[in-house]
Amino acid sequence: MDAFVARQPIFHKNKKLYAYELLFRTGMSNAFPGVDGETATSSLLSSSFFTVGIERISGGRQVFINFTEDLLLRRVPTLFAKNEVVVEILEDVRPTEEVVAACRELAKKGYTLALDDFVFRDNLQPLIDLAKIIKIDFRLTPLPEIAAMIKRLKGGRCHFLAEKIETHEEFIAARDLGFHYFQGYFFSRPEILKNREVSPGQLTAARLICEVNRQDMEFRHLEELINQDAAISFKLVNYLNSAYFGRVHPVASIRQAVAFLGERGIRMFVSLIVAGRLVEQKPDELLRLSAIRGKFLAQVAGEVGCSEGEMFMLGLFSLLDAMLDTPMESLVGRLPLSVEVHDALVGRSGALAPYLQLVENYERCQWEEVDRRLAELCLDPEKLQTYYLDAVRLADIL
């Protein structure tokens, strides 16, 4: 059984990352092909906590996980630390006396309870009284109905989470309605598409990323570029001397750092550090998502015979319009990108476009589209989760 886990960010209203929701699929035919919710969640918990290691995908944040009625009755959430898991109670869980008792026990032990896909019903009041978070689908529920629910429940102990927020305008609307938390990819869309000037420094940073990923880039020239930038040099040496690598002898020079990481590693590291300059006024998750896409596609490149540098830049620059709040076409025309990368970024066309669509489908848990892309590109599905988790790991240590 192929178990796939993806994560979706949840933000505070100040756009700071709050937590992730972990989303699961198994098999290669559909999101839940003949798999009930209990099996799905059990497989997710086993994969995330026991096999993968929750820290690899959570980045030290709490994770929201769906629990079925039976899993709640069996007290399965108590197998995990209360500071790691937010217990999501699915919308089809019946608020029986036994379920309410189990949830009350979890709440007394300090677990955070969240009601998923919430629509108000009188019989849900016992669960509402125990929940700290109520999740409302912003696209499925009409705005007047959402406003009425919030007005009715406001003043209680719970906070409201708006799901499926995909644009900045939707984020503003949900915030104004009284939501505290927001889930969706609104942060990855441009907020302004006109009357916006890209600073020379930002353009220089983007060009430097292109430069370090050139196939004909010489190691000596790469070392010179890094030595010319004090911030990159400091971050690189500090990164390699961190506990993550556990080095006995610290790295003392850029030459040593380049030799230690190797050509691929140093190019990727410099690109990601430089990309951080493009998102200084944006949620940190925007850079993380760009890094995940870049690393994911760089690994796919090795399997399909594409240029690793081009595929990495394709993923990293796929959110460039959101980073700079400028139309993609206006940006990539000023960068020395290949025709293939240009066409994939601007028109979602050409030979590389399906790979970008694959990683987007995966991060949004559009599993049927993932299946179709894998078949179309002749990719091994068993490697997909490894690629994703490796990419997440890289993004979270930046």
Image: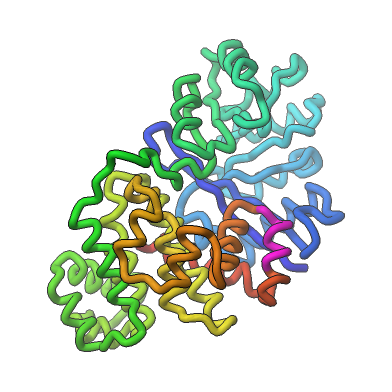
Say whether residue 309 is magenta: no
Q: Nearer the viewer, residue 107 or 12?
A: 12
Say whether residue 367 is magenta: yes
Residue that appears at 78% across and 68% down: 1
Residue 114 located left or right of residue 43? left
Image x and y of residue 104, in percent: 67, 28
Residue that appears at 42% across and 55% down: 319
Magenta-colored span? 366-373
Q: Nearer the viewer, residue 303 or 246?
A: 303
Q: Nearer the viewer, residue 87 or 183?
A: 183
Residue that appears at 62% across and 67% down: 385
Residue 337 located left or right of residue 139? left
Whether residue 6 is situated above or below residue 120 in the rendered picture: below
Image x and y of residue 125, in percent: 70, 17
Can see residue 84? no
Whether residue 331 is situated above or below residue 165 in the rendered picture: below
Image x and y of residue 246, in percent: 34, 76
Can see residue 13? yes
Which secondary structure dominates the residues rendered in magenta? Answer: helix
Whether residue 370 is situated above or below residue 219 in the rendered picture: above
